[in-house]
């Protein structure tokens, strides 16, 4: 109904500051939280959680009310933690583009650029648009599949920690 549309608009603003588009099975299943109103409230709480501590609070609340977290909910919490990390270093976009992942905005001193290229071969540094485009990791060097789900989040978090300057 109407309230739902209103809520979605609200969410888009909350999420606008850090757009994370990665292939991750992250959601709150109906079986876990059957009432739509409560599911929406849980999504809203996560959207508002801008720090690890905030995400932890939501995790505790969900566990208290609905029981142990199923995998897609644990993944959703991991996305929220990742979003907090990205926000802390000033990123607004971490988006999969085919075989690569785009991080924006990124401004790196030359030393960090060299380090990025050494640690993540094949990375494109587009200084003019403050963007780096990094090859997505594979499950195996030969004939592997692109890494997805929380393993891809972990990889992206590691890249941020290894290469991006702390504010």
Image: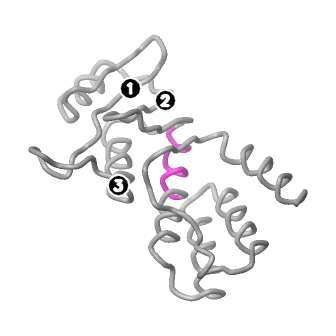
Question: Looking at the image, is mark 2 or mark 1 earlier in the sequence?
Answer: 2
Name the residue that disc number 3 marks: 154
Q: Distance between the residues labelled 3 and 1?
A: 18 Å
- Left-right relation of 60 to 150: right
Q: Vertically, is 22 above or below 56? A: above
Main secondary-structure element of the magenta-colored stretch: helix
Asked which colour scheme the image uses, the reply is one colour
Q: How crowded is mark 2: few (under 14 residues within 10 Å), some or many (20 or more)?
A: many
Residue 1 figure quarter: bottom right
Element carrying mark 3: helix
Q: Dot 3, crowdedness within 10 Å: few (<14), some or many (≥20)?
A: some
Q: Which residue is drawn at 38% across and 23% down?
A: 108
Graded by Cα atoms within 10 Å as few (under 14), some (14 to 19) or many (20 or more), the crowding at tag 1 reads many
Question: On residue 120, which mark appears?
Answer: none
Q: Mark 2 and 1 residues: CB-CB less than 8 Å, in contact?
A: yes
Q: Please give left or right for residue 147 compared with residue 82 in the image.
A: left
Where is residue 22 drawn, in percent x and y?
45, 47
Determine which residue is flagged by label 1. Answer: 132
Alpha-carbon distance for marks 3 and 2?
18 Å
- Is residue 3 placed above or below 116 in the rendered structure? below
Which of 160/155 is in front?
Answer: 155
Q: Residue furthest top?
A: 128
| 135 relative to 9 in the view: left or right | left
Badge count: 3
Does 11 appear in magenta? Answer: no
Residue at numbered disc 2: 104
Question: Along the horizontal axis of the image, is 7 left or right of 62?
Answer: right
The residue depicted at 53 percent of the width and 50 percent of the height is 83
Marks 2 and 3: in contact by CB < 8 Å? no
Q: Is mark 2 on a helix, strand or loop?
A: strand
Part of the protein shown in magenta: 81-89
């Amino acid at each position: 109904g109407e309230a739902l549309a209103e809520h979605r608009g609200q969410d888009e603003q909350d999420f606008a500051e850090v757009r994370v588009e990665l292939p991750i099975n992250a959601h709150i299943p109906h079986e876990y939280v059957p009432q739509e109103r409560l599911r929406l409230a849980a999504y809203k709480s996560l959207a508002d959680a801008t720090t690890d501590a905030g995400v932890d609070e939501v995790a505790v609340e969900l566990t208290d009310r609905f029981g142990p977290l199923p995998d897609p909910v644990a993944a959703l919490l991991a996305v929220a933690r990742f979003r907090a990390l990205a926000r802390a270093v000033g990123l607004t976009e971490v988006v999969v583009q085919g075989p690569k992942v785009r991080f924006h905005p990124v401004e790196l001193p030359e030393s960090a650029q060299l380090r990025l290229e050494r640690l993540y071969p094949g990375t494109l540094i587009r200084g003019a648009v403050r963007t780096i485009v990094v090859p997505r990791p594979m499950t195996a060097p030969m004939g592997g599949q692109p890494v997805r789900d929380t393993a891809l989040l972990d990889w992206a978090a590691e890249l941020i920690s290894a290469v991006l300057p702390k504010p």
